[in-house]
Image: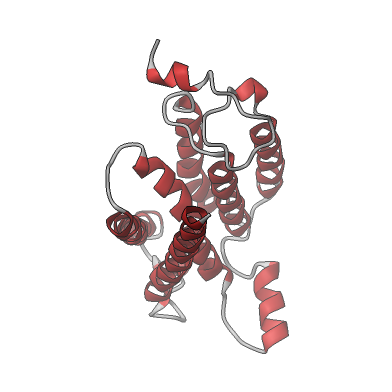
Amino acid sequence: MTDSSQAFQNIEKPGVLFNKSPIPFKKNRTLQIIIVVLVILWGLTAIRPADWTFYLLENIPVLLFILLLAFLYKRIWLSNFSYLSISLLVILNAYGAHYDYTNTPIDGWIRNLFGVKGEYYDQIVHFSFGLLMAFPLKEFLTRFIKLRTFWLYLFIFSLLMAMSATFEITEMLVNIITNPHNPEKHMRLEHDPFNTHKDMTMVLVGSLISIIIMIVTGGRRKGK
């Protein structure tokens, strides 16, 4: 019997978020609910998006990533909390893509509430990427590498920043190909030349907050 099949014998109660062992999908009610809600909300964002090309470019890579997680569920499992974090990020991205990441209702609400100009939802999503992906990365990495706490969190932080930089470079290349006459449009550089820098800064802040939370909560568990 393989290690993965042995681990599946340790079935915890359905409905657990921070499960410490894998739960067969048929008995994992929490994950089933997460997926149903994800599909419904994701489907709603696909109704008459502002720009179908942009919407697909933003969501197809995410869909492939979700399918990969599903395929590897029995081999490389994550806690339900990690799947919930990933799902929240997927919905935040799909919502922004629906509005072409410009003039979302949330942007309008921020402008009216604080009396500011510009578009902020894109930065919220980048902040959420750093905040929500740190814990799933920690769970994934701890299964394959043996690093002490400091080096583990440093690696998580470095990986998140590298992923952010890779995304910005990819976004630049895609926009040059799909919008050769105006690649700055979807990159929001027309009115803000520092947009890319702000996006990466938000990832930095979000990841640091998440890492600090993990360090504090981890220390409390050890102290008990």
Q: Position of residue 70 (x, y in %)?
A: 51, 29
- Numbered label tally: 0
Residue 216 appears left or right of 45: left
Give the colouring mode of the picture.
secondary structure
Q: Position of residue 131 (x, y in %)?
A: 50, 61
Q: Position of residue 128 (x, y in %)?
A: 53, 61
Q: Residue at x 28, y 41 (%)?
A: 145
Q: Residue at x 37, y 75 (%)?
A: 197
Q: Eyeballing the image, is 33 above or below 56?
A: above
Q: Residue at x 60, y 24 (%)?
A: 25
Q: Quadrant of residue 3?
A: top left
Residue 88 appears left or right of 105: left
Front residue of 12 and 71: 12
Q: Quadrant of residue 115?
A: bottom right
Residue placed furthest toward the top: 1
Front residue of 19 and 187: 19
